[in-house]
Amino acid sequence: MAKNNSKSAKAKSAVKSTLQFNTSWSYAPAPESADHVKLQSSYDLFIDGKFTAPAKGKYFDTLNPATEKKLASVAEATTEDVDLAVQSARRAYDKVWSKMPAKERGKYIFRIARILQERAREFSVLESMDGGKPIRESRTIDIPLAAAHFFYYAGWADKLEYAVAGNRPVRALGVAGQIIPWNFPLLMAAWKIAPALAAGNTVVLKPAETTPLTALKLAEIFQQADLPPGVVNIVTGAGATGAAIVQHPGIDKIAFTGSTDIGKGIQKALVGRDTKLTLELGGKSANIIFEDAALDQAVEGIINGIYFNQGHVCCAGSRLFVQESVAGMLIRKLQDRMQTLIVGDPLDKNTDIGAINSRPQLEKIEEYLKIGVKEGAELFQTKCEIPKKGFWVRPTLFTNVAQSHRISQEEIFGPVLTMQTFRTVEEVVEKANNTPYGLAAGVWTDKGSKVFSVSSQLRAGVVWANTYNKFDPTAPFGGYKESGKGREGGLHGLLPYLEVA
Amino acid sequence: MFLASPSIDQTGVEERVQRLNTRSIKKNSKMDALKLAMSMLDLTTLDAKDTEGKVRQLCRKAIRPHDSFDDVPSVAAVCVYPNFIAIAKDALKGTDIKVAAVATAFPTGMSSLEFKLKETRWAVAQGADEIDMVISRGKFLAGDYKYVVREIEQVKEACGPAHLKVILETGELSTLDNVRRASDLAMDAGADFIKTSTGKIQPAATLPVTLVMLEAIRDFYYRTGKKIGMKPAGGIATAKLALQYLVMVRETLGEDWLNADMFRFGASTLANDILRQIAKEKSGVYQSYDYFTKD
Amino acid sequence: MSDKIKKFEDKAREKSEAELSQKRLGVMKTYKLYVDGKFPRTESGRYYELKNSEGAILANVCLSSRKDFRDAQTAARAATTKWAKASPYNRGQILYRMAEMLEGRSAQFVEELTSEGLTASEARSEVEQSIDRLIYYAGWSDKYQQVFSAVNPVASSHFNFSMLEPTGVVSLIAPEETGLLGLISMIAPAIVGGNTVVVLASYSKPLGAITFSEVLATSDLPAGVVNILTGTRAELISHMTSHMDVNAISYAGSEEKELKPLQENAALNVKRVSLWKNEMDWSSEESQSPYRILELQETKTTWHPVGI
């Protein structure tokens, strides 16, 4: 009895021994200056190498989601504008781009990569202003990686025959229509444009309506690099503009990154047409922690998997699976680590989690938080301060989650993690695969053979072992099942833009 | 015996360090951190050519690091060889500054247990407040953990009231897995502090090694509720690097470790770089080392 | 006496002397070796006179010795670990940077190649092709691995893959007939694959090679990755090919009296040999190929169990 008492007293004191991260010494604000960014009050469409007013004369606003203030007005492209852009791309393809020696084509793309490296600071700041992502990420990931993509594909331009089996002759498709999302505005533009150009195609690109500015700045780089007019055209607008690209008969190839619903719509719209299609769609990726994993590094991988870019990541490790024997310890470590995350001004160098990209997205995430609580999951959010203006969500962890809960089935696209426990490999593989999605997965174990065994059983296009959310121009990326088709990046990312004889 | 230590993934540790290093410390946050770092210093001289004069000068620097900056705190301790303990005690009379002495056949530890215990007792009798011992790396690498634990336990006993810092000499342990295992067994054996290095072996303290040790301290705290201190030593020569260590402590262990009772820097030249940075913050212009006394 | 004085009373000469006394003297360039990121003279202190077609001396060029090669080999060996570990992306950036530096200094190269006997347009064309060749191999830096490596579908429960690693230190004997394009065509595939090289430049056209070392020195290329010697084949080839701490030979030429001993020396420690024959048209795109990278690579196959 007495022994029991002392044991429970000991257990209690262990619970009390919590770490205190609200420290007396902390970081002063360290905002990155925005002086370096030259913004116009209004942006036109980039067609045929020139900025061109939209046919209907309509413009829409793009906001800074951290302040809700307007950054600029941006032209809304209608069917007429899209038609003009496609014609310009076709002409550039026929007259210049397809006739140019491949190595010269490559040198243009090298130039773009270099100028982007030179102007990286300006692009990073603007990306954070327009999209809400922390400057730490735009500066160390988005912009350098975008430049690296141009650099990588530039080198392929005169080596295409080596990209296909048997060194067979290859040719470009023609005009590619590309529609990209708001979570990695410039990086997605690079993922799309670089392989298309290297393979010899010309491009009509539509950035997302909430984040068009870095793509339009990229157009300035195309001018600076003397890229021939029409090789890349950028048309801004919302869903209707995208639909106009998809429906245009002069388009030989559609590449879309965005939600699974719209992706399905595009695939249907292209039925009966000879248009190639790649889709990068949604995900609900499993991040699996085995008991033998290096737990502290796994915690870091979980954080990076779900809180990177406010969780606006299609391959986010949003479903956490932890082996029961380490679940208690892992939750404790994870929650302590979450307490050190700083939410706020995207331009502050110390910010870990920036602003939610838009009000509708904020509302969607908040709705899911309510659903999760209603479904009976246990909600944990950190106590960090958040600004009054702007769109914010604190880092969130749901424990006590069931496979049947909506929050563990549906893509939330925010800093919201659900955690489930498991006992055996068979069980976790079954649960991880039990979803219409199949974009990515994480596996954490100290045992190499388990990495390959589990990885081979997972129905996902990317499996990260003892790491998460790693991207490289040389590595193909894309989904199984309803997460998309085709791959972007690497050698495989060239094939969707090529026809092999 | 201690619990099985978890495995450590080197790549993951290095990425975490890289991320911590992106923290930007500016303005008053920087000034506060510089003073905090100064207060955590174990101002060290461990040269075979040390003399009484050298030790006395060092002690004066420890008490008042800069002649005109009244707001700069004294350092936490002075770290010397055992034969200078009495001199240091005398020179530091009337202050809160501790005297730390290296013992146990520092820096190699290549002697008998009897000798090490005798040396420890003698150092404590001379007035040492803190004993910095070295573990037997050869025994550790040969897998004789029992020996290493037993040795630490006995030195701890010999320390009596003095605090025991256990030097792992991580530069000789080769892997982060070994660093973690050595940290765990030192804490289980009764260390009050765990310390990276003697300063005589390269590499000495590094950020990845320190992160692994801080995480071991955290897990020990989770498990037992006991707070063990941390001392990176050797190779920390710049204020900028010292601030990176403070960021790491802040985000791994938090408030309770951000003080000289729980965290120390073992360094000899760091003090002047901290002063240089403080002077720069005060005056707005970058400083030359010529304006700061060597000892 | 007065006759003697009269002898110097010459108006034209006086004028030229007046000019001479006021003229700014140009600084002549000293052509040295490039070893371990520095520009030493040959330890032997010897030189040879490089003359143009009119017989005027263009430069006193270092006549490297066996010891110079030994020093260069030491530097190349020391540089292997770091260079082989550099990321392919980084190696690509550095090769691209070399191309940028070469482009920026193209006028100097054109001038040197012209002084060695090319017409201005031939020289310009050689420099431009050299720049493009660097770009070509810069592009291969992060691609040859994807083209040549493999995942092997072995029958047992193992994950099995083969990938390339650099072979190590390469002795590189550059072609005699072209000063720049051939040299770059041989160096680029060797170093883009992570090898380090000791180069013997063309004896009759060494200026481009020496000036190219200035491009290397300003391109973030680590010291020791490329080392450039000038001198005679007759003196150096046997040392370059027999050294037991050299892993491969890249040789341009078809001279039987060089080739046979070279092949025999290669056999001393199974050096890989990459041959570039005399009939090679350096300006053709056929002289560039990823297989040139492959010739200086080792293939490593790794087996790893798959299980739980």
Image (cartoon, coloured by chain):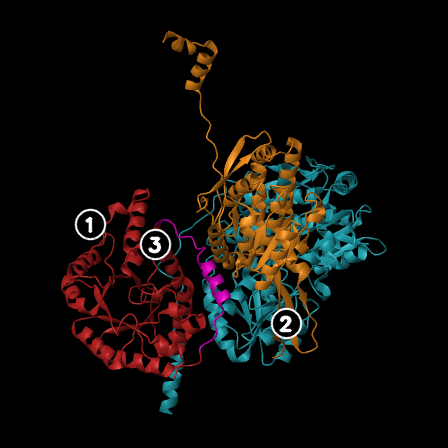
Can residue A236 be seen in this snapshot? no
Is C167 left or right of B175, judged from the image as shown?
Answer: right
- Residue B34 location, quadrant: bottom left
Is A114 left or right of C284, judged from the image as shown?
Answer: left
Q: Which mark is residue A405?
A: 2
Is C169 left or right of C277, judged from the image as shown?
Answer: left
Measure the alpha-carbon separation of dots 1 and 3: 21 Å
- A177 is within the stretch colored magenta: no
Q: Which mark is residue B67?
A: 1
For the N terminus of chain A, give its image quadrant: bottom left
| Of the pair A477 and B294, the residue shown nearer to us | B294
Q: Which mark is residue B238?
A: 3
| Of the pair B99 and B104, the residue shown nearer to us | B104
Q: What's under tag 2, amino acid-wise?
A: His
- B11 is within the stretch colored magenta: yes
Q: What's under tag 3, amino acid-wise?
A: Thr
Chain letter matching colour red: B
Chain letter matching colour cyan: A
The stretch in magenta equals: B5-27
